Amino acid sequence: MAARRRKAKRRSSPKSFRILNAIESYAYASILTRNFAGTSPLGMLTSGSDIRAPSSTYSGPMTFVNADNTVSLGELIQSPDLAFQALSSNVMNNWKSAFVETLAVGVSFRFGKRLLSRPINNINRNIMKPLLGSTIKI
């Protein structure tokens, strides 16, 4: 008779909000939107729409006209074909810098968290937990 297999331990999601993880996530979002959409994450959500097809007198290739060289959520909704042309153009031009910046952010947050773990634990234990409970941590 074969031995019984043990069940894997269930992993629960963390019950607290970590400020450093939110800052790291915003840094990644900022890199992606700056390099590929030409704006900040907030600008991507709130900017207006100015992307358009060229006028009928234009005789060149049918691409897009984008006065501010940014792509916003409004442009993605109003004219997705032109917005995706602009995004793909930005991706082709800026993917290398986005890759390097993403690596730099990942490495610096990893080493920064490791280097500052004692002060962060001290702040969480002595300031954040008494003030806010265990729901928000640095």
Image (cartoon, rainbow, N blue to C red):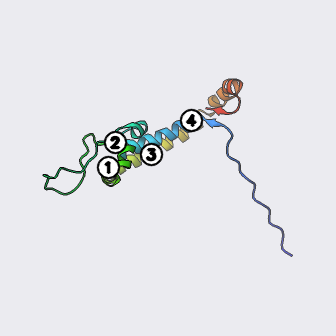
Q: Quadrant of residue 50?
A: top left
Q: Which mark is residue 90?
A: 1
Label 4 – label 2 distance at C-alpha: 25 Å
Mark 3 neighbour class, 10 Å CA radius: few under 14, some 14 to 19, many 20 or more: some
The residue drawn where x is 40% and y is 40% is: 44
- Across and down, in percent, residue 28 comes to 47, 43
Q: Secondary structure at mark 1?
A: helix
Q: Earlier in the sequence, mark 2 or mark 1?
A: 2
Residue that badge 3 annotates: 102
Left or right relative to 60: residue 12:
right
The amino acid type of the residue labelled 4 equals Leu
Left or right: 52 as drawn, with respect to 103: left
**Distance of mark 4 from mark 3, alpha carbons?**
16 Å
Q: Earlier in the sequence, mark 4 or mark 2?
A: 4
- At 46% from the left and 42% from the top, the residue drawn is 29
Q: What is the C-alpha distance between the residues marked 2 and 3?
A: 16 Å
Q: Secondary structure at mark 2?
A: loop
Residue lying furthest right in this view? 1
- Residue found at x 28% / y 45%: 51
